[in-house]
Amino acid sequence: VGDDIAKGTKDWKGLKITVQLAIQNRKATVSVVPSAAAMIIKALNEPPRDRKKEKDIEHDGDVTYDDIYETAKVMRPRSMARLMSGTVKEILGTAQSVGCTVDGRHPHDWIDDINDGTVEVVDYDAPAQ
């Protein structure tokens, strides 16, 4: 089981992610369930780090709005928001707490633009699982 987890999580080296184990007939299948913060940090393309040695790291990079939208699409089934714009705002809030900017602007400026209608969020219905 440990080898399967190591194989399934090698793309996420240096990040905290949740691993879902589905066990059927004593066979374990591993699936990765990334959090919004992990996906944003992965979109920053930072080099992998050793969490035991490097503490309190600042993620001061810049991600694109397309990265935020793609992350929101993945997170849509687990989001509590009624509309896709709410999910995008959740991801922008996560980007703010991670400490990165979106297309050179502060994430809360994007949230304000979505609230007043300057930025239009294309609706997206997540496929049923």
Image: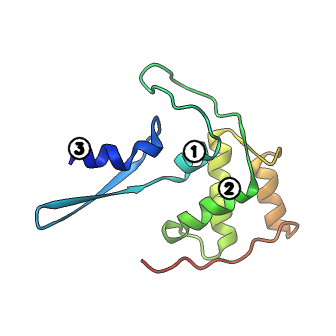
Amino acid type, residue under disc 1 in the picture: Lys
Residue 41 figure quarter: top right
Circle 2 sits on which residue?
Answer: 67
Q: Position of residue 58 (x, y in %)?
A: 63, 29
Quarter of the rendering occupied by the C terminus = bottom left
Looking at the picture, does residue 58 appear above or below residue 27? above
Secondary structure of the residue carrying tag 1 is: helix
Is 127 displayed left or right of 7 in the figure?
right
Labelled disc at residue 2 = 3
Discs 1, 3 touching: Cβ within 8 Å: no
Circle 1 sits on which residue?
Answer: 42
Is 56 displayed left or right of 111 in the figure?
left
Q: Position of residue 32 (x, y in %)?
A: 39, 55
Q: Residue furthest left?
A: 26
Looking at the picture, does residue 82 appear above or below residue 108? below
Discs 2, 3 touching: Cβ within 8 Å: no
Amino acid type, residue under disc 3 in the picture: Gly
Nearer to me, 112 or 95: 95
Is 59 displayed left or right of 36 in the figure?
right
Q: Earlier in the sequence, mark 2 or mark 3?
A: 3
